[in-house]
Image (cartoon, grey):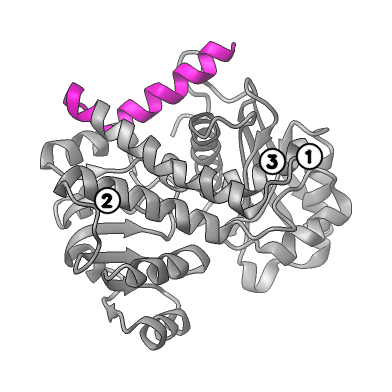
Amino acid sequence: MEIFETDPGFGHERVTLVQHRETGLRAVIAIHDTTLGPAAGGCRMWPYPNDRQALADAMRLSKAMTWKNAMADMPLGGGKAVIIGNPRTEGSAELLHAFGAAVESLGGAYWTAEDVGVGLEAIRIVRQTCRYTFGVDRDPSPWTARGTLMAILASVQHVFDDDSLDGRRIAVQGVGNVGGQLVGMLTERGAHCVVSDVNETAIAAMVDQYGVEVAGIDEIFDVPCDVFAPCALGGAVDDDTIGRLKAAIIAGSANNQLADPHRHGELLHEAGITFAPDFVANSGGMLAVGGEIHGVDHTDAELTEMVDGIRTRVNAILRRAAAADRPPAEIATAMARDKVLAAR
């Protein structure tokens, strides 16, 4: 990737590289856009193969957060942080304190929260050296799962003219905090789920609780299904997997599901596969906890209504995309950009 973007008017405002000798912390904090408010987005910890991949991930994720918060009509901009390392062996309290101090030094331009490899307990440790954390007192994952369900319902209604999931075959890639809860919601509505995950314990729990079918990590892309739901890391839809997918719909909770948003969005459109834009489908968690940044604490009833609105948003995007004969991801991105530009 090019480090300096050429997207007119939407290059990153600030990208900070963090290194702390005493703890071994290596991190990237990417602030994409603060037009609508302070940049907000989680921090993930992952053993990236090299620094450049970590930088690329932070920049892609932070840009997606700008679009996510804009489409959710939240007074927040887009930001993201990544810590290079294995969360199982390297996420010490000292390292998290050093990360918190780095976020604190930005003076509120970026607010951090949980993400892959950085759970609620870790963010509570970050909070000990940083005022700019959110999502600590309410778990966003059930709301992310519910929002993803809403995106699936909208997509199924759009494609099959019937939103019933009874008997629908849904392949769920990744059954962690969000994906696992989504499987529960889907099976409750009568769907037959096929799941995959690198975590065998998580898979066993899904089999015990819901009687799901299991596919291998790579085999999940070949499963004939009505809906393919990527709920693991990003980039699942790429040059290889597009040709293998046997789904009518892609709708999941993962960030950056398309390895190349423009090109792979076009390829899905040409293949006749409906894609629920990820930054809309997975926005339930941000709706649930993002208000904390401005001191707003919604009730569960209010959150249910807000998150269920994701169905209306996805439905509107799919209708507009069909009318224009364009990929839904392109339509959703244009809508988000327009919201930010209007605020400027």
Q: Amino acid at mark 2?
A: Ile
* Residue found at x 69% / y 68%: 90
Residues under labels 2 and 1: Cα distance? 35 Å
Dot 2 alpha-carbon crowd within 10 angstroms: few under 14, some 14 to 19, many 20 or more: many
Looking at the image, residue 280 lies above or below residue 149: above
Residue 287 drawn at (x, y percent):
58, 44
Badge 1: few (under 14), some or many (20 or more) residues near its Cα, within 10 Å? Answer: few
**Which residues lie in the magenta part?**
321-344
Figure disc tally: 3
Residue in the image at 45% along x and 70% along y: 180
Seen in the picture, residue 136 relative to 207 is either above or below; the reply is: above
Task: State which tag comes first along the sequence, 2 or 1.
Answer: 2
Mark 2 and mark 3 lie on one chain; the one further toward the N terminus is 2
Disc 1 is placed on an element classified as: loop
Quadrant of residue 58 within the rendered picture? top right
The C terminus - image quarter: top right
Expressed as whole percent of the image width and height from the top left, the position of residue 137 reads 74, 58
**In the rendered image, the vertical position of residue 46 relative to residue 71, given as above or below:** below
Residue type marked 3 = Gly
Q: Disc number at residue 291?
A: 3
Q: Residue at x 59, y 52 (%)?
A: 301
Which mark, residue 48? none
Pointer 1 residue? 295
Q: Quadrant of the N terminus?
A: top left
Residue with the mark numbered 2: 250
CA separation, marks 3 and 1? Answer: 6 Å
State the SS at label 2.
strand
Viewed as shown, does residue 267 lie left or right of 23? left
For residue 306: magenta?
Answer: no
Circles 2, 1 touching at the beta carbon (< 8 Å): no
- 190 vs 153: above or below: below
Q: Are marks 3 and 1 in contact (CB under 8 Å)?
A: yes
